[in-house]
Image: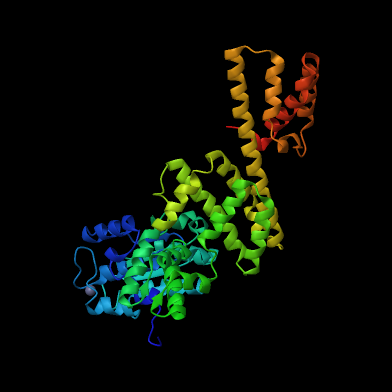
Amino acid sequence: MSSYRVSARKYRPQKFADVSSQEFVTQTLKNAIITKKTAHSYLFSGPRGVGKTTIARIFSKAMNCSNPRDGEPCNDCDSCREITAGNHPDVFELDAASNRGIDDVRAIQDAAKFFPIKGKYKFFIVDEVHMLTQQAFNALLKILEEPPEYLIFILATTNPEKIPATIASRCQRFPLQRIKISEIINSIRLIAKEEKVKIDEDSLFLIAKLGDGALRDAQGVFDLSVSFCGDKIRYEELKNFLNIPDKEIYFNLSGFIREGNAGEILSYFNELNSKGFDLQTLFNGITEHLRDLMTVISTGNTELLDESDSIKEKYSAEAKTFSAEQISRLLKVMFEAENRFKFSSNQKILMEVLLAELCRMNKEVIDLAKIISGLEAVKKKSLTEKSPESEDLKSEESIIPESITEYKPAEPEIKNTVQHENSVKKADKTNPGDSELIKKLKELFDLEEYKFN
Ligand SMILES: [Zn+2]
């Protein structure tokens, strides 16, 4: 393993055709090269690890190649080889995160004055360009305003909103996309094949997902996995090594939530916590699990899930046990807690509160749904049978589950309370038996979390 090279470097695409998920950008650049309609400045924006500097290098190669084919570099001529090796005299790369001052941009200004030494074009690839100081941006603007014929700037950034409008407006802008999970999987599968590493499908999924849309990050996880598992990567071993909560855990958690079993979920969580799982990963995992269930319920299939077939089947079955409304309420709890959780100094306690809240909320939504369907049944019955009022009320009361009769709203608004009293008073006059029921229902419907859209 000593000769093992980091995958991200070894397998960096050398042609536009090899770049994943950015067809819009690569095709546009290729067409510009073929029709000789290239611009002098480009702005590539997008998350880290999606190929910004990779595309910039391929572009500089194709423009300087002595034998380009269909807009692609040959990767064989002197110029191509030098750019690949990072020692072409006309292609400059600058990391603005560490060279952000006026002097650094002045050096570019000076270098830009001279004709290319070897190639046809002089390239300046400035990564993380949003980090430049205002002075440096002003100096850069001067070059961009009147660039010499041979000069091409490629500015790359993860924060395009921080680029002054005067700079951005002079660039052709290309927003790069996150890389699709399926493409990351394909890419890792190819690397594994090249490296003669056996890897199962579930491991491929796990590695691709940990990359979170960045191929470079996924390749990093793959390298790490190889260093631990050797040339045979098995899911069971890998997930233990990475200490990643298994998918099964989330299905167990949603099972407890479905049953409204706060006691069980808390003891299960404590068991998980003792295994040392990262709680932020667990939090994100629960949100993602609920989101996946919501997707399956909304679309009626599992096509949009980034999961293996065996996991997709489980989602199909699990989705049938929840309604869209239930899941959306649970997701709302998670989203509202997101920031609080991230910055909490005691994530363990907060997670316990959250899990108990998810159980409680889900139970009450089920109860409310039961009441509504019960009331509808009663209404239907009274319409068809025209039975005496008292009998209807009797059956209405029997429909209310115990937990609801115990339910106390947190802080009802004063205005609402007055309304309650009015309605209760009126109800008292007409029929003393249903006052309590009406009051409870009104309280329920007045609460924000029970409002139906
Ligand atoms: Zn070439």
Horizontally, is 199 left or right of 446 in the view? left
Q: Is residue 111 visible?
A: no
Horizontally, is 448 left or right of 26 in the view? right
* Residue 219 percent across, percent down from the top left: 41, 71
Horizontally, is 93 left or right of 391 in the view? left
In this view, the residue in front, 95 or 239, is 239
Relative to 132, residue 397 above or below = above
Horizontally, is 382 left or right of 153 in the view? right
Q: Is residue 61 visible?
A: yes
Residue at left 42%, top 78%?
A: 226
* Residue 285 percent across, percent down from the top left: 55, 58
Relative to 371, residue 122 above or below = below
Quarter of the image where the C terminus is located: top right
In this view, the residue in front, 82 or 415, is 415
Residue at left 48%, top 57%?
A: 160
Classify residue 25 by image quadrant: bottom left
Relative to 154, residue 397 above or below = above
Residue at left 24%, top 80%?
A: 78
* Residue 61 percent across, percent down from the top left: 28, 71
Relative to 298, residue 6 above or below = below
Ligand 1 is found in the corner quadrant, namely bottom left
